[in-house]
Image (spheres, rainbow, N blue to C red):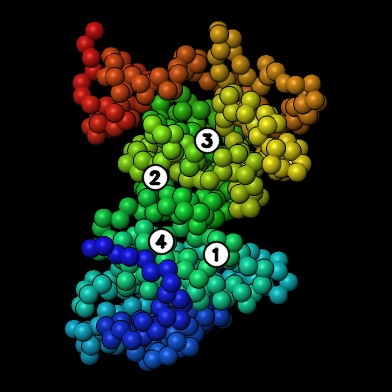
Amino acid sequence: MNIIHNKDIGTKQKALAINLDPKIYGSFAEIGAGQDVAANFFKAGAAAGTIAKTMSAYDMVFSDAIYGAQLVKRYVSEQRLISMLNHEYSLVMERLSAQRGDSTTFFAFSGTFSALNYYKTNEGHGWMGLRFQMEPNGEFHDVVLHVKLLDNDNNLQQQAVGVLGVNLIYACFYYAQNPVVFLHSLMDDLTKDRIQIDMIRFEGPGFSKVDNRLMSLHLVKFGFSDAAVFGPDGKNLQPSEVLYKKHVMVVRGRFRPLINVHLDMINTGVEKFLEEPDVDKERVSVITELTLQALKERDADDNAEIDEKDFLDRVDILCSLGQTVLISNFHQYYKLVAYLSKITRLKIGVVLGYPNLEYIFSEEHYKNLPGGILESFATLFSRAVKLFIYPTLRNGELCNSQKFSLPPNLIDLYEYLLANNKIEDITNYNENNLQVDTDNVLHLIKSNEVGWEDYVPVEVAAMIKARNLFGYAGHSKIE
């Protein structure tokens, strides 16, 4: 079925269309940022056709009494949202299914938000979700998302929540069969400088063909968020809930595929990071990062496109090795650090190969910044941030931070960073890895050359062979 995204239908029209649909009926529970989602349905007219109940529980004691005390003592959290959906949907089904279950697709909408406070000292954000039926007497489905509110005014943030909530409910009932159209429609009557959606998850039998990892990719690809995260189990995660109050150690790569060099970079980088005196070993999160640019392959006409299967192949391998994966739109490292620094105030470690150190110190990459390289470095090396350099072998010579050639105008700056422990070499690396060209390994796999398995972890080789990944098409050639 071809589902068309009608961009011209506004918030009020969407709410009215739902109100006039006799099959759609349910309840609203909203905490924080007003009750602007339900309000849109009341203002549209014919709300009695949709709304069984609307409520809020701002007081923490009342909220706990209704939805139960949570292990996570944050009322704006995914755990609180899920408890709200569980409670409200159960009530709808318990009280209404016998009367009208044969002709109605029931739903429960819930949201928990922290909008901008009076003094503007917080960052607005929140969770919303819809539990709903796709057919009468059918099983329920969930769509859950996290949103950042970027307006610099409380009323505007509340209004944005109201619009997004209507978009979500409309998408669930009219665009559920096309996830890409679904995602695009969430931004109707909104702009990307007003909200960012950095996590979304689809669950239920009707979404069995939806890969939530692709949904994470789409959020970044469409510009709805600068970054998205999912765990080793492939489940989408909200970045702040994973990295909040954590020491973060990040390794960026193309991972096409992950080879022994990458694994050694991760392991040796973690070892170095844990040796830092201001790092609590019990509070470390290790992240492997894929940027949009690293995912793009150019075709014959030099057009950059993302191969979704190729993306999932890389992710499957990373997750199989227990990695938490970050997809980002941060081509430059200082933007990555700026993003992570907003989530955690603890130490951040960045593991990178020697060629990337050269890239960071190339002034040409900062021509668009008024302050040039100094402006980027003010962010990159701010507070507790440290770079760990994995060496490279060139023409038989070892290249690391101690043998780094720079133009005269940057030497003093570089010496300052070294003296202040902002850059350090990884010394416990596997010397055999220095002989490996990562692009050449991919060529060996595609060509079925003997011995390519020696360059990748055993688990990765098995997965490549079992699923014919990265151009592998059969048994290796016999010399």
Could you tell which of marks 1 and 3 lies nearer the N-terminus? 1
What residue is drawn where x is 70% and y is 37%? 367
What residue is drawn where x is 53% and y is 20%? 429
Q: Quadrant of residue 208?
A: bottom left
Report how far apart the C-alphas of labels 2 and 3 lie in the structure: 15 Å
Residue closest to the far front:
301
Q: Is residue 351 above or below residue 1?
A: above
Could you tell which of marks 4 and 1 lies nearer the N-terminus? 4
Element marked by disc 3: strand
Instruction: Return the residue nearer the eye: 55 or 34.
Output: 34
Report how far apart the C-alphas of labels 2 and 4 lie in the structure: 24 Å
Q: Is residue 430 above or below residue 302?
A: above
How packed is label 2: few (under 14 Cα within 10 Å), some, or many (20 or more)?
some
Mark 4 or 1: in front is 1
Report how far apart the C-alphas of labels 4 and 1 lie in the structure: 13 Å
Q: Is residue 360 above or below residue 223?
A: above
Which residue is label 4 attached to?
Answer: 183
Report how far apart the C-alphas of labels 1 and 3 lie in the structure: 32 Å
Q: Judge whether residue 462 can be spotted in this image.
A: no
Mark 2 or 4: in front is 4
How packed is label 1: few (under 14 Cα within 10 Å), some, or many (20 or more)?
few
Q: Quadrant of residue 312?
A: top left
Element marked by disc 4: helix
Residue 103 position in % (x across, y down)? 21, 84
Could you tell which of marks 2 and 4 lies nearer the N-terminus? 4
Which mark, residue 191?
A: 1
Mark 2 or 3: in front is 3
Q: Amino acid at mark 2?
A: Pro
Residue 400 position in % (x across, y down)? 63, 19
Which mark, residue 251?
A: 3
